[in-house]
Image (cartoon, grey):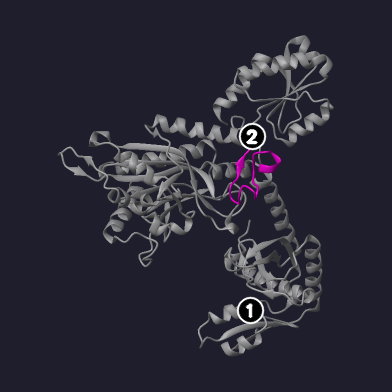
Amino acid sequence: MINIKEDEKLSVLNHSCAHLLAQAVKHLYPDAKFWVGPVIEDGFYYDMDLGDKKITEEDITAIEKEMKKIAKDGKKIVRHEISKKEALDMFKDDPYKIDLINDMPDNEVISCYTQGDFTDLCRGPHVESVKLLKYFKLTKFSGAYYKGDSNNKMLQRIYGICFPTREELDEHLEELESAKERDHRKLGKDLEIFMSDDLVGRGLPMFLPNGYIIWQELENYIKNKEKKLGYQHVMTPCVGNVDLYKTSGHWDHYKENMFPKMEVDGEEFVLRPMNCPHHMMIFKNKLHSYKDLPVRIAEIAHDFRYEASGALKGIERARHFCQNDAHIFVTPEQIKDEFKSVVDLIFDVYKDFNITNYHCVLSLRDPADKTKYYQDDEMWNKAEDNLRQVLNDIGISYTEEIGEAAFYGPKLDVNVKPAVGNEYTLSTCQLDFCLPAKFDLKYIDKDGVAKTPVVLHRAILGSIDRFMAYLLEETKGVLPLWLSPVQVNIIPVNNEYHLDYAKKVNNLLLDNNIRTNFDDRDEKVGYKLREGVMKKIPYTLVLGDNEISNNTITYRKYGTENKITISLDEFIKLVNTEIRSKK
């Protein structure tokens, strides 16, 4: 899908259309006040204060009609340059524009654009005339806090998209419809994988039985791979003493992303945002020799981060999630080999899941940012040089990004482009000289001297929650057999005659650890088949007289109309082979 923000002509067109939207809203709601209307990757939006009015689908239809009427009128779009004093006077009735203007330097020349009876504050540029804004669509609407701050008033946000031709608009709308069908939030609801409820709390998803099966399968999958590589799995508390995070530095550098502290019996606790402090203390629990290293401590850990409400997105971005986390304690000489082992594991997993659309980013600190990063130039230079050298030595192709490092060290991020939405990081491996020193970690080297280990922080699946969201959208919910919550749907043709045989087949499949749905409801077979397709169940068995007479089963595979009859033993072997292959 095209990125509107990165295409200069489309960016100008969409920004102009945002003004057209605001003008139409002003015609329909004369008391409307406007905040900002920027271009974004998939079009534009405008935040507005409509008083007590809440936008509905009917309102969107009326606004679109008014936009078309204004565009047909064909007024020129004219730029004006005014002083700050003139701008304050021009927009004196709009507190949101006044707020923007007050933030501008006193001597700055301010620009605004007029189209007919509507003038808006804007740097521009814009198209020459509203008649060029023919092919647009308002795509959705939502609430948005003023300045993104939940302490401020909730405004109305309307999103839209604009193209120069009808063909381009139609093509984009088809892509949007496809993306909507892939959205893991829709699939999660349709397939009964997870749910959310404001009474529990925003950003706190709950996994339903189907979702928890997928979750457990992913947990077992990655744990088995880690065990073969020498990882030791632990379990640590979801809370920690505030002093733990003061020691690690998270309290100084990450506090705004943490939930507020709680006081209990004179101690202050916080929900943990990550697991490294706990794992540091596990390493410190006993004396280590250089012969013990690397020490690989892993955990499927529950973490909590205070994400802004506007950033929450199903299980892709939530306030509670479970990381496939690990911390590897190494000597300096072991950095390269262990880092390569982590990278090999990442790409081994990607091969299993057929993940090919990714790229690697070396995330570095911004030396000018004296707040975000732990201040130790020597440590940073050493860590960044080490990591860059390791990546070059093992032949990883990567780009560099300034300002994307963790506060304690540089990292390799593996970013994926999902089927829906923006690129995000799925896997990461971070090099850390900082936290081991902060926690005074030691191992006894071969010369008998106590030395500080280096730590690799790594997450292969990232968070299991986000990895599930990625898989749902990539597969449109048609998960591979080994991950499917229900693997085989069993339908007796007639409960009066075929139920006992269907029960026998169901029990044999369960005995072979195959997950089934035994559909003995008093419904027509056609209805049950259609429902099985809607639930995207990989195999459906329809069992009637022929199957009973010949001690066979007849199955249909999801996505096909073919009916195949084989013995029950052959079917069990077929299914188990496919499950083991993890295709």
Let me know if residue 242 is in the magenta part: no
Residue 322 horizontal side relative to residue 372, left or right? right
Chief secondary structure of the magenta portion: loop
The image quadrant of residue 74 is bottom right
Quarter that holds the C terminus: top right
Rendered position, 573 above or below 213: above
Residue stretch rendered in magenta on the structure: 188-208
Of residue 72 and residue 268, the one placed in the foreground of this image is 268
Q: Which amino acid does label 2 sit on?
A: Asn
Determine crowd level at label 1: few under 14, some 14-19, many 20+ residues with C-alpha closer than 10 A: some
Rendered position, 235 above or below 173: above
Percent position (x, y) of residue 548?
Answer: 77, 12
* Label ID, residue 95: 1
Residue 71 horizontal side relative to residue 261, left or right? right
Residue 357 horizontal side relative to residue 375, left or right? right
Q: What residue type is labelled 1?
A: Pro
Q: Residue beneath label 2, please?
A: 210
* Label ID, residue 57: none
Secondary structure of residue under mark 1 = helix
